[in-house]
């Protein structure tokens, strides 16, 4: 078995430069949510180069590259859209031309999350070269629109593409750790209504902004009272945006609305989070309306797949067969014990496991603190290590854990699909 791990790691190291160049090519192609077409086509080109057995771009624009023809279906997910670059004065280098030295690659998407795509594609190459397919089918997924609506892409993949893997490895950055969960979130809108009048005589109107003021104070206080989980941490609430309407700067505002970023820990869901706000005294006194945001933006193909801005919490047990598979892979490759952790931010796992019960676990190149940051970077060593991990996971799973999990997983997935 040691020889197996050694060969995989040697090949991953051999392909470091090609992985790095592929990543730099992807970074050079701006791909904010809804604008991913060029990077998807570049991924298709690389998948063809390294010998994927089948490559599909679905109607939403996600790319699915397949290695092998076995009965055990495993997916590796990397979203390929990015956020914008923000103020260019904060960047030491062009965020798309990037920068590279012997250790790092810099540019928008390096850690979040094109590095994971580079490692996944080269894992496919390693599997093909060493003949490791066995009784598994590995599908590397380059998903779209995650930054705007995490998990929506996988709602489409599961519901419309009818692609239901036994488990999914999420390649969001983990800094060398194995991640087994994250808090969920829901985007909430709170609206107050008023009556406009001339600003010189405000008593004639009903100021919607004033109605919002006590609500803001009660929301701040509510954040301190939210529950906490020992592993995932505390539920939180943050007011993230404020808007209003008014005939002019010389008039009383006739409406005001705010956005609330509500993070959900274990035991919380969207209904509970919305109801907590609806029941605040200031909300009831103002007659404020509390709703969940919806997402209806088109993908780069023009397809609109609407959904609520609700992203459920998910958590996999430390001794779950999928988590154990990754831990075995880590020990075999790197001869040390893995650290198990969680993400603070949100991932596509909110749909894969949060909605549908398909087990998820995370391992990816890059660090979480690089996400959305100026001078975003990733580490070449982590690209190599991640490619090696993804390449050994299918065989370790089939040999050691598949029979223990399949019956349970199918039952859980079917129940969740019926509920959704």
Image (spheres, grey):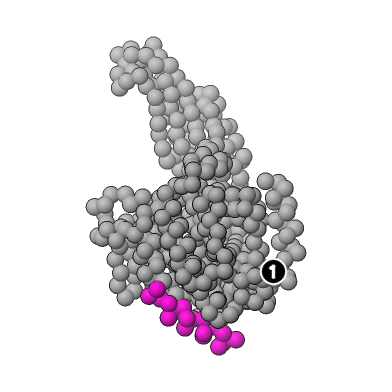
| Residue 183 pos. (x, y %) | 54, 53
- Secondary structure, magenta segment, majority class: helix
Q: Is residue 418 left or right of residue 387?
A: right
Give the answer, above or below, for where 105 lies relative to 142. below
Give the answer, above or below, for where 271 lies relative to 284. below
Helix, strand or loop at disc 1? loop
Residue shown at 50%/24% (left/top)?
Answer: 286
Residue shown at 30%/22% (left/top)?
Answer: 249
Look at the image and tell me whether residue 55 can be seen. yes
Look at the image and tell me whether residue 342 can be seen. no
Q: According to the image, label 1 marks what residue?
A: 71
Is residue 46 magenta-colored?
Answer: no
| Residue 284 pos. (x, y %) | 55, 26
Q: Nearer the viewer, residue 125 or 402?
A: 125
Q: Is residue 30 left or right of residue 79?
A: left
Give the answer, above or below, for where 6 lies relative to 211. below
| Residue 210 pos. (x, y %) | 41, 24
Residue shown at 44%/53% (left/top)?
Answer: 37
Residue stretch in magenta: 1-18
Q: What is the residue that sits farthest to the bottom in this orientation?
A: 3
């Amino acid at each position: 078995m040691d020889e197996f791990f050694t060969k995989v790691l040697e090949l991953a190291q051999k392909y470091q430069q090609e992985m790095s160049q592929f990543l730099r090519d992807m970074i050079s192609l701006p791909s904010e949510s809804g604008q991913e077409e060029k990077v998807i086509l570049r991924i298709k080109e690389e998948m063809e180069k390294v010998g994927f057995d089948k490559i599909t771009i679905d109607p939403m624009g996600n790319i699915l590259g397949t290695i092998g023809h076995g009965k055990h279906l495993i997916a590796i997910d990397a979203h390929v859209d990015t956020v914008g670059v923000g103020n260019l004065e904060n960047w030491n280098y062009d965020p798309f031309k990037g920068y590279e030295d012997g250790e790092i690659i810099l540019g928008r998407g390096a850690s979040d999350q094109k590095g994971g795509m580079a490692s996944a594609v080269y894992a496919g190459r390693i599997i093909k070269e060493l003949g490791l397919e066995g009784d598994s089918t590995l599908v590397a997924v380059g998903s779209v629109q995650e930054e705007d609506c995490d998990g929506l892409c996988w709602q489409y993949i599961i519901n419309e593409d009818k692609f239901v893997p036994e488990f999914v490895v999420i390649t969001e950055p983990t800094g060398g750790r194995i991640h087994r969960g994250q808090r969920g979130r829901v985007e909430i809108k709170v609206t107050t209504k008023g009556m406009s009048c001339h600003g010189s005589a405000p008593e004639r109107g009903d100021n919607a902004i004033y109605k919002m003021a006590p609500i803001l104070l009660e929301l701040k206080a509510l954040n301190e009272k939210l529950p906490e989980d020992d592993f995932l941490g505390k539920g939180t609430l943050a007011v993230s945006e404020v808007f209003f309407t008014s005939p002019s700067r010389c008039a009383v505002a006739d409406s005001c609305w705010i956005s609330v970023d509500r993070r959900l820990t274990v035991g919380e869901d969207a209904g509970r989070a919305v109801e907590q706000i609806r029941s605040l005294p200031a909300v009831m006194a103002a007659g404020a309306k509390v709703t969940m945001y919806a997402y209806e933006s088109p993908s780069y193909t023009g397809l609109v797949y609407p959904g609520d801005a609700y992203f459920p919490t998910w958590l996999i047990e430390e001794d779950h067969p999928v988590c154990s598979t990754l831990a075995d892979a880590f020990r075999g490759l790197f001869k040390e014990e893995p650290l198990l952790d969680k993400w603070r931010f949100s991932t596509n796992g909110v749909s894969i496991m949060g909605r549908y019960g398909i087990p998820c676990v995370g391992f990816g190149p890059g660090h979480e603190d690089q996400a959305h940051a100026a001078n975003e970077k990733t580490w070449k060593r982590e690209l190599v290590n991640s490619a090696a991990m993804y390449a050994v996971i299918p065989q370790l799973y089939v040999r050691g854990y598949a029979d223990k999990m399949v019956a349970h997983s199918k039952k859980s997935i079917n129940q969740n699909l019926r509920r959704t």
